[in-house]
Image (tube, rainbow, N blue to C red):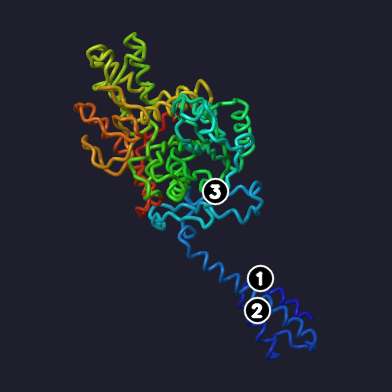
Amino acid sequence: MLSSVWIVLSCHASRPWPYIITLFQTLTKSTPFQSSLSLSSFSYSHFLCVFFFFGTFFMALSKISTSHTPSQTLKPNFYSKPCVPLQCYDARRSGVSFEQHRKLRISCSVAPNQVQAPVAPAVPSDTTSNRDCYGVFCTTYDLKADEKTKSWKSLIKIAVSGAAGMISNHLLFKLASGEVFGPDQPIALQLLGSERSLQALEGVAMELEDSLYPLLREVSIGINPYEVFQDCEWALLIGAKPRGPGMERAGLLDINGQIFAEQGKALNAVASRNVKVIVVGNPCNTNALICLKNAPNIPAKNFHALTRLDENRAKCQLALKAGVFYDKVSNMTIWGNHSTTQVPDFLNAKINGIPVKEVIKDTKWLETEFTERVQKRGGVLIQKWGRSSAASTAVSIVDAIRSLVTPTPEGDWFSTGVYTNGNPYGIAEDIVFSMPCRSKGDGDYELAKDVIIDDFLRERIKKSEAELLAEKRCVAHLTGEGNAFCDLPEDTMLPGEQ
Ligand code: LMR
């Protein structure tokens, strides 16, 4: 009996060798305990040991096989923190078990020098849309049957991520009111939230219901991008994690990069083939790059990083200095990254059609104070508000969309972060860089060619370019370009970080 207890204990220790030796000794009756073992106690202990031996053996096997996955072999660092399932199916609403719905788990990222599988947009097996329509929006209407609405354009689907957040709370009501797409453009809003924000998302949908917007014909909510992005023609990607205390910028790039990699895959799988994507979540340029790299079936040209807020801020500062109303400022380019390296271009900007430098003679102010004010405006605002800009960001998203769906006024241009793929300014290819663009109003754009670049401007543009190239190296594991290597410049910051 004693030996049987010892055998069981040695099995429990999850180390097979003591057990194997003991089993062997028991079977050959040459145990050091010398066998007072009765037949029945032998059979009992034999059974238990066989049970524990195989249990131990299979546990060891499963450990060995898991430890071969690359992410487990990492040295612990901020890259190898346990992953959080960022998007999961809405189990509560679809009636299928929550665990079943965890198919879209975002896999752990990898450390520098660890190769992750190349980007291969994986399409989950069940991508059919079962996001939920909300309340009054579940009713269907025949717009052609109604005298008032029969001349309207056909409905467009607009997906918004981070839909329960502050920016969206301003934006959604502008979209629904018709001020963005026009008074004859009915819209459907497809709202993406997270598990945590689902209640709040329902609150947003309730407020949209109660607003009785004539143009808002459909609202659906969900937490699975493969459902929410179904057939969308616009994707406004606002949701991202803010940089928490003590978080490295590289860590932020990695965490948010994973969100945008997943959303890129979802867009690739289910969105309209000509969807226009505006990335707002920071760091928006590199998030946009990650997103487009994960959506190879959507033209890279369709992806934008929002730098329109910076353009608006720059216009405001120039107007203030010149003592004019801000609608007199035109041709305002923001070059580069939506960060403190961004370059507000006072060389090409105009006030009342006259070059800014001829109106504002204080070159030192332009080169230092003006530039810094624009670069750091987001941070100053956070200090005042205690949170990031929301209303002005929403307005700038509206401006960015309107710039693409209405023809650019003659001679003017607008700024947007776009994929560099053959640009006339000598900016490195294959990054998302803010540049001056014009549109015919068809949703597309062309780069403005009639710009001048002097040495001062070029030097600053190069700094922002270097920052974006460094960010790109840091997320190589998310763009399918192999080893991630983070050598971010030390002073690299979001506008809100000071
Ligand atoms: C802004 O420019 O206001 C934001 O991007 C700032 C931030 O870091 O959230």
Percent position (x, y) of residue 414?
Answer: 32, 27
- Name the residue beneath numbered marker 2: 19
Three-letter amino acid code of the residue under disc 2: Tyr
Q: In this rendering, is residue 378 above or below 468?
A: above
Callout in the foreground (2, 3): 3
Three-letter amino acid code of the residue under disc 1: Ala
Residue furthest top in the image: 323
Q: Could you tell me how far apart the alpha carbons at marks 2 and 3 are, in whole angstroms? A: 54 Å
**491 and 253: which is toward the camera:** 253
Circle nearer the N terminus (2, 3): 2
Asked if disc 1 and disc 2 are in contact, CB closer than 8 Å, the reply is yes
Where on the image, by quarter, is ligand 1?
Answer: top left
Per the image, label 2 sits on a secondary structure element best described as helix
- Name the residue beneath numbered marker 1: 13
Judge from the rendering whether residue 419 lies leftward or rightward of residue 5; answer left or right.
Answer: left
Residue 129 image label: 3
